[in-house]
Image (cartoon, helix red, strand yellow):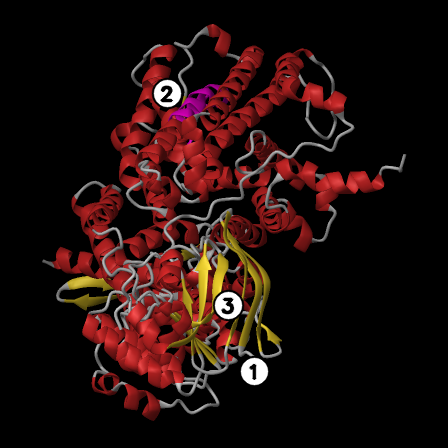
Amino acid sequence: MNTVVLLTLTGLGLAALYFLVASGLSLVFGLADVLNFAHGLFLGVGAYATWWAAGNLPGAGPDGLGFVVAVLFGVLAGSLVAVLVELVLIRPLYSRTIEQVLVTVGLSLAGVALLQATWGADPRTFPRPAWSRQVTSVLGAQVPNAGLLLIVAAVLVLGALLAFLRWTRYGLIIRAGVENREMVTALGIDVRKAFTLVFAIGGAAAALAGALGGVYFGTVSPGQGGSLLIFAFIVVVIGGMGSVVGSAYAAVAVGLLQQFVNYYGTSGLGDLCVVGLLAVVLLLRPQGLAGKVAHA
Amino acid sequence: MTNSVVDAPPAQVPDELTPGHSRWHGLRPYLPLVALVVAAVLPYSTVNLPGIFEGPLNSPGTLQLLAICLVFGGLAAGYDLLFGRTGMLSFGHALYFAAGVYGTDILVTKAGLPLWQAAVLTVAGGTTLAALLGAVALRTVGIAFAMVTLAFAQVGAILVARDFGGLTGGEEGLPLDVSGLPSALVGVTNTVNLYWLALAYLALVVLVVHRVSGSPTGRVLAGLRDDERRIGVLGLDPYRFKLVAFTLAGGLASAGGVVYVLIVGGASPHITSSELTLSLLVMVVLGGPGTRWGPVLGGVLYMYLDHRLTAFGSSDAVDSLPAFLSHPLSQPLFVLGTVFILAVYFFPGGVASLRTRLTPLLTALRPPR
Amino acid sequence: MVEPVLSVADLSVRIAGLHILQGVSFEVAPTGVTVLLGRNGVGKTTTLRAIVGLTPRGGEVGGTVRMGARSLLARPTHRLVRDGLGYVPEDRCVFAGLTVAENLRLAERRGTTPAYDKVFALFPELDRRGRQRAGSLSGGQQQMLAIGRVLLNDNRLLLVDEPTKGLAPKVVTEVAEVLERVAESVPVLLVEQNLAVVRRLASDAVVLSAGRVAWTGDARELLLETALTKSLLGVGAEVKA
């Protein structure tokens, strides 16, 4: 029983990480049709910016309020990079899907290399608040606090995203744009502003994943984003591109499946099951669990 | 999913040079043959090209680098069968190359098969794998297809990294057991034979891709790239044609893996990474998708730069630069990634389009007669 | 001749190597309904989409399109629409996952008051069904929503693409009635296949054939000439009133 609770909660922690990366990917893809390989870079920027801020930024630190400031700085940096990428690199190629993918591919290669050039290829120890290293007893299982932190953060982000999509004008434009971008412009709306916005949101969520993932794993390295990105892609496809709720369901399914099979089966088998799940979903429901609708 | 068809790269029309170059014109069809002969006799040269290669042309180090470049030229040309000629954006091509590398390595080293049996089995296996996975992946189109192929390739990477059954050697890789190999392919002095093998592989791929794209099937593939619906209207099944292209490209990639494992003498897990597929994409786009020589040039150039930029990065010239310049420049992927982004913006046709782009300039510069 | 609200001159569109429009020229009168007719595939929808700037990527557009003194081509769609070019696309294109109220809210613009009273007077159904998902509306109701969405703002010209396509005969009559009332206040360029609707609404007609203008003139005149109608539109000789 204890093991099941522990595996469930660590699986959900993993799911939270996937969701933070996948929700932005999914919105960016759903609205702008951009398969963003540079999304892992936003995660890396968030992680390194948090790491840097904790050591160097006045007012920020590895603990207490200072840690919150450091994470905020990281999220802001990730969001800023995402907006710059959209404005400078993606927007000039508006509606030229292939070129946009190619640019993000180039960016992911160059960006990771740049992180590596600046801070080295080896993992760096991540600043962690003392409490995040402790465990909390949940139903008799000793669960790492860092995992719980991820879950709480992901739930908050999910709630905030849904409220944003449901209640704001830009949320409305994004939901409509995911369905039919052309028709949004035919109602007199400049849909490209919404593109910039989803990049900013996606970049912020990914950067948050980078910062909290750093706390969870205890280290940060340039390639971290890339390996997470592939599973985030899988989550996006399973969940249905453009659907935030679909991403959340899919992230939970993938996180739990991976954690349980890796524990009860051989290590690595869980990862394979996830790809198997992807194949099954695609054969049965090619549009993913939620189809191309940004549900509020 | 909205627009299901991935926008294809622009079709390349080989535009002929302006009149007045009739002698050049007459020679053009034979140029590939000339290039092949030059490449074939190159190992007999002892020319030293300081700065370009570290040793004379016929030194084993240079020949090995050239052989790797040739294999990747072939690999890129095979990948272009999917991307440039059919408009399919696969992010999992590394899987079939890795299948070739690891398949040969395991069959030779672990099962002790003779090389030719291992090679035949591996290529057959790699082709079958491509057919099976392609049959599933091609049920999706466009970006979803890209993601599915990426996921399948990730399975390959996981299998290799987790070292199930101790077959792959995990992170360490699996050195090739050379004791059972033909002696002509073993040892530093025989690097030249591996070079010729790589050249033969490249020639084979170019020939196959050329024959296929000139055939009726190739015209259907080009049609799929330009507008899939039109092919459907003609009563042809896009799925079957795409599967043929996917399987063929997969088979060619696994054959490339067989050659590659012989050249580098073993398998290492980085060849299973999605980064390798992304590199293939970069090679094809840099060279010029859908052209006969563009992808080959792109592949050769990319691998050359990837190897040489490492040396360049640690050279004195770069070291003397301020840190904010020298650090990024010492990362080959930073340089290549940046060049790639610039190429997407400014040279959409790749290296192969440079000549046509330069023609007006050259014409303008030529003194009037 | 009064100044036309829209003048199209030598419009040509080439998509994926196909020359779909080959020099189309016509004018839209500042009042009433001008109908764009022709057999399937002659380029009616392509014409409307080119006017509103929605030619697919890779398509080449040539010629000129003017609304008043302003040239429309090469300006982004959302600007054209904000300048008073209302577009009701083929197949309605309502946002199926959004509610009726949200579909309408999307069309609101900063700085102007949306004319909800006008729209709800025309379509009381839209008021009643505000919380329903647009995807669950009937075809006729979706068409009403698509038209209502555009009427929330002031328009100088409406482009309406096959509003009665796939609707039941009774609903066709309703849609025609609504368009008749709409056309009292704003000129309409209408693509329509149903000749009964054309007879009821249209004052002027432009007939396209194979990417060119084959006939322009008074709509009633065209419909009276059964032989002409048959040769241009490929419909039976008897046109029911």
Q: Residue at x 75, y 42 (%)?
A: B360
Q: Which residue is mark 2?
A: B104
Q: Is residue C137 above or below residue B135?
A: below
Question: If you read the primary sequence from the N terminus, does the residue marked by circle 3 or circle 1 appear first?
Answer: 1
Horizontal and vertical percent position of residue C123: 27, 85
Q: Residue at x 36, y 68 (%)?
A: C223
Q: Nearer the viewer, mark 2 or mark 3?
A: 3
Q: Nearer the viewer, residue A99 or B2?
A: B2
| Quarter placement of the N terminus of chain A | bottom left
Looking at the rendered structure, the kind of residue marked 1 is Val
| Chain label for disc 2 | B
| Magenta highlight range | B251-268
Dividing the picture into quadrants, the one containing residue B88 is top left
Q: Residue at x 33, y 74 (%)?
A: C199
Horizontal and vertical percent position of residue B116: 38, 11
Dividing the picture into quadrants, the one containing residue B162 is top left
Q: Nearer the viewer, residue B160 or C206?
A: C206
Specify whether disc 3 shares its chain with disc 1: yes
Q: Which residue is mark 1?
A: C2
The local secondary structure at tag 1 comes to loop
Q: Which residue is mark 3?
A: C51
